[in-house]
Structure formats: structure tokens, C-alpha cells
Image: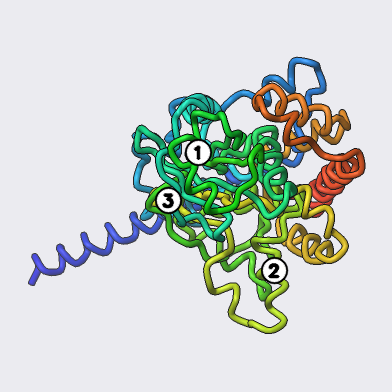
């Protein structure tokens, strides 16, 4: 009996000590978060260095050691890692935390994209078949067995929009778009010689400029996350449900925040905005896959079919602007890297110049396809300015975090 009492007393003592340790750890963790938040509120702002060298630094490719789309590097399995209230913060004011950004895969790095573009420009196309959406698009197989989606375009706006959207993403450091090149369907082109009969059957015009984007296999659909649906308060730094998200889920939401910024700037209505519009007659549209958005098994989001961006999106802006504004207003947490580039383009007001330089330096057929009109270039700068103001609004609203 005495032994039983002693064991019971020892057990109760251990429980008491464990409780004290748990409470102390929680208080220590909370105090640490408070310190970092306070420091962030003192120092927080849009980090803009306006020196001539800064913009070149901002255009540097993501760290080479990060996993990239299309590469063989394997990312860590993050699915079961959960961020809870007792662990590190998922945000630093209005920005995703640095530790979380460090885990984000690099996507299609510029180094990888350049290597693919160099190969794709020299590889003969040996087969064209359906497989990339509408019949005017074709799935091309190169002589080395790799594949690309060819966009002929019902009109030149579509190919131009797809191409300029890709280079705007590069300018912003958003690496979720597959690499892209332009090619011309000239009669003396060796690249298209093996599929000349197929081209004639498709009634593609000789001399037309088409775009080719890398085809990525093993992709699945993506459903709009709960914080970005119509019944939610939006994606913001004090959203309590984010504390129960796994690291993988937070990384996906981080990519969504980039996607919404990107689609707002390009006025691309053929993704989340079209779903929001469709709510008028389809109350469950947000529960189904989002248009033109896919995901790799590793969790990388892939932004595909961006033909509605910039050119066509700007032409029909009046029809869709209220939906664009609604979607943008739903997000108040951003990648710091992306906001740096937005702030730089806002301050310098040279988005047309920077985009044109990157486009012409990277694409030999840029002159043949053409560029934004002066009117549309002004619209792009205006949207950059509006986005910058929205970021400042979020900063002011959540400055005490």
C-alpha cells in the first residue's frame, strides 16, 4: 500500500512539473512572437532601395538550391508539418514569414527557363495533336521527345497576351509560369517541316507567329482555398484558421497571394475572377477546380493559359473591373519579394520600359509579334500604382501586428 501511495505521489509530482514546463514554454514562445511583431511594426514598410543597382538585384533568379519545376530535385515532404499557435509565426506583419518564403520552391527558374528556350528554338517539331485545350491550340512533340503547347490564337491578341504576361511574371519574380518561346510558321522553316501537312489541315496561316510553352506532366486541378471564397473574410494576417494549416497549405496560400496580385495587374479574368462572376448562377463554382490553374504533386502552382492577360484583359476591363477589385481586396498578406518589385515599378513609373527591354532582350521575334500600345502600357502602370496603394492600405490596417 505504501509503495502504491509513493508511486501515486511521484506520478502527481511529475504531472505538476510537466504542467509548469508547458505553461512556461507557451509564455516564452508568445513573448518571443510579441517581440518580433513589435520590432516588425517599428521597422515594417515596403522595402524599396531606389538605387540603379537595386532593380538588377531584384531581378536575380531565386536561389539555385531551391527545388524547381521540371527539375529532378526533390522537395521535402511538408504535408504533415503543421503550424500551430505555439510555433513560429506564419507572417511578419503583412508579409509571409521569411522562414516560410525560404521553403517555397523556386519554380521555373530563369536559368532553367533559358536552357529550355534555347533547346526549344532549335528542336524540330515532329508531331502536332490535340491536347492543349481548344482546337486552335496543339500539343507539339519535339524530336527529342519533349512536348510543348502551341498557341496559334484566334487573333494576335491572344498570343501577345500570353507572351507579355510571361515576361511580366519574370519582371515580378513570379516563377509559376512555364517557359515560353515564339516561333514563326514560315514555309522555309526547318522546325515545322515535318508537320507541314498537319499545319495545312489546321488552316494556320503561313508566316503567323505562335507561342510554345513547356508542357508539364502529372498536374492536377486546384480548388480555391477557403480564405479566398465569397463567404470568407479574406486572406489577412490575423486569420485565426491559418494557425491550423500545414506548412504545405501555407506555401500554397503564399502562391495564391502572388496569383491574385498577378491576375490583377494583367486584368486576367479567366481564372478566379471568372469563378466569382459565375456565382450569380452557380453557387458552388468555388468548390470546383479553378480555371487555368494546376498543381504538381509537390505542391507548386502552375499558372497556365494566360492569353486573357494584358492585351485582351485591358480591352474588356470595364466589364470585369469590379470583380478584379473584389478579388484584390480579399488579400492583405503578401510575399515581401513581390511587393519589393511592385514598389520599385511604382516609384520609378517605368513598367513599360522595363517590360519592353526584357521582352526584346529575351525574344528574337518580339518585333514581329509587337508590344503593348501606349494606352495599354498606361493601364498597366495605373494598375501597378493601385496595387501599391492597396499594399499600403493593408500595412496601415495591420500595422500593430
Q: Is residue 391 left or right of residue 91?
A: right
- As rendered, which of 62 and 117 lies closer to the eye? 117
Residue 17 sits above or below residue 43 on the image: below
Disc 1 + disc 2, Cβ < 8 Å? no
**Residue 95: percent from left, percent from top:** 66, 44
Mark 2 neighbour density, 10 Å: few (under 14) some (14–19) many (20 or more): few
On the rendered structure, is 395 left or right of 4? Answer: right
What is the basis of the colouring in this image?
Answer: rainbow
Marks 3 and 2 sit apart, C-alpha to C-alpha, by 28 Å
Mark 1 or mark 2, earlier in chain: 1
Report, in whole angstroms, how far the alpha carbon at label 1 lies from the one at label 2.
29 Å
Camera sees residue 125: yes
Q: Image point 57% across, 43% down: which residue?
A: 177
**Is residue 336 shown to the viewer in this render?**
no
Mark 1 lies on residue: 107
**Position of 383 relative to 122 (above/below):** below
The residue that disc 3 covers is: 296
Marks 3 and 2, the one that precedes in the sequence: 2
Question: Are circles 3 and 2 on residues that touch, CB within 8 Å?
Answer: no
Q: Secondary structure at mark 2?
A: loop
Q: Nearest the camera: 304 or 207?
A: 207
From mark 1 to mark 3, how far is it between C-alphas?
10 Å
Q: Position of residue 146 (x, y in %)?
A: 39, 38
Q: Which residue is mark 2?
A: 233
Helix, strand or loop at disc 1? Answer: loop
Q: Nearer the viewer, mark 1 or mark 2?
A: 1
* Percent coordinates x, y for residue 3 in the rendering: 8, 65
Amino acid at each position: 500500500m505504501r509503495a502504491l501511495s509513493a508511486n501515486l505521489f511521484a506520478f502527481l509530482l511529475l504531472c505538476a512539473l510537466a504542467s509548469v514546463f508547458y505553461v512556461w514554454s507557451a509564455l516564452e514562445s508568445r513573448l518571443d512572437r510579441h517581440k518580433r511583431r513589435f520590432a516588425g511594426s517599428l521597422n515594417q514598410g515596403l522595402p524599396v532601395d531606389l538605387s540603379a543597382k537595386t532593380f538588377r538585384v531584384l531581378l536575380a533568379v531565386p536561389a539555385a538550391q531551391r527545388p524547381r519545376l521540371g527539375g529532378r530535385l526533390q522537395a521535402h515532404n511538408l504535408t504533415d508539418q503543421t503550424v500551430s499557435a505555439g510555433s513560429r509565426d506564419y507572417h511578419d506583419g503583412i508579409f509571409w514569414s521569411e522562414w516560410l518564403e525560404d521553403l517555397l520552391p523556386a519554380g521555373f527558374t530563369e536559368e532553367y527557363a533559358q536552357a529550355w528556350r534555347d533547346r526549344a528554338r532549335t528542336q524540330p517539331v515532329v508531331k502536332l495533336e490535340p491536347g492543349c485545350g481548344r482546337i486552335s491550340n496543339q500539343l507539339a512533340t519535339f524530336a527529342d521527345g519533349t512536348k510543348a503547347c502551341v498557341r496559334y490564337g484566334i487573333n494576335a491578341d491572344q498570343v501577345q497576351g500570353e507572351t507579355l504576361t510571361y515576361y511580366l511574371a519574370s519582371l515580378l519574380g513570379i516563377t509559376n509560369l512555364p517557359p515560353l518561346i515564339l516561333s514563326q510558321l514560315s514555309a522555309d522553316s526547318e522546325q515545322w517541316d515535318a508537320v507541314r501537312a498537319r499545319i495545312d489541315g489546321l488552316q494556320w496561316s503561313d508566316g503567323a507567329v505562335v507561342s510554345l510553352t513547356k508542357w508539364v506532366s502529372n498536374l492536377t486541378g486546384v480548388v480555391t482555398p477557403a480564405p479566398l471564397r465569397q463567404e470568407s473574410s479574406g486572406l489577412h494576417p490575423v486569420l485565426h484558421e491559418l494557425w491550423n494549416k500545414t506548412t504545405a497549405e501555407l506555401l500554397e496560400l503564399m502562391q495564391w497571394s502572388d496569383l491574385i496580385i498577378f491576375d490583377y495587374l494583367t486584368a486576367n479574368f479567366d481564372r478566379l475572377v471568372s469563378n466569382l462572376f459565375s456565382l450569380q448562377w452557380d453557387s458552388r463554382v468555388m468548390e470546383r477546380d479553378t480555371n487555368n490553374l494546376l498543381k504538381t504533386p509537390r505542391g507548386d502552382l502552375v499558372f497556365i493559359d494566360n492569353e486573357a492577360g494584358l492585351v485582351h484583359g485591358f480591352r474588356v476591363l470595364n466589364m470585369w473591373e469590379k470583380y478584379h477589385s473584389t478579388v484584390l481586396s480579399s488579400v492583405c498578406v503578401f510575399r515581401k519579394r513581390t511587393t519589393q518589385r511592385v514598389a520599385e515599378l511604382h516609384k520609378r513609373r517605368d513598367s513599360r520600359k522595363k517590360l519592353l527591354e526584357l521582352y526584346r532582350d529575351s525574344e528574337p521575334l518580339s518585333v514581329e509579334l509587337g508590344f503593348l500600345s501606349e494606352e495599354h502600357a498606361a493601364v498597366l502602370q495605373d494598375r501597378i500604382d493601385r496595387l501599391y496603394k492597396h499594399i499600403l492600405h493593408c500595412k496601415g490596417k495591420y500595422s500593430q501586428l
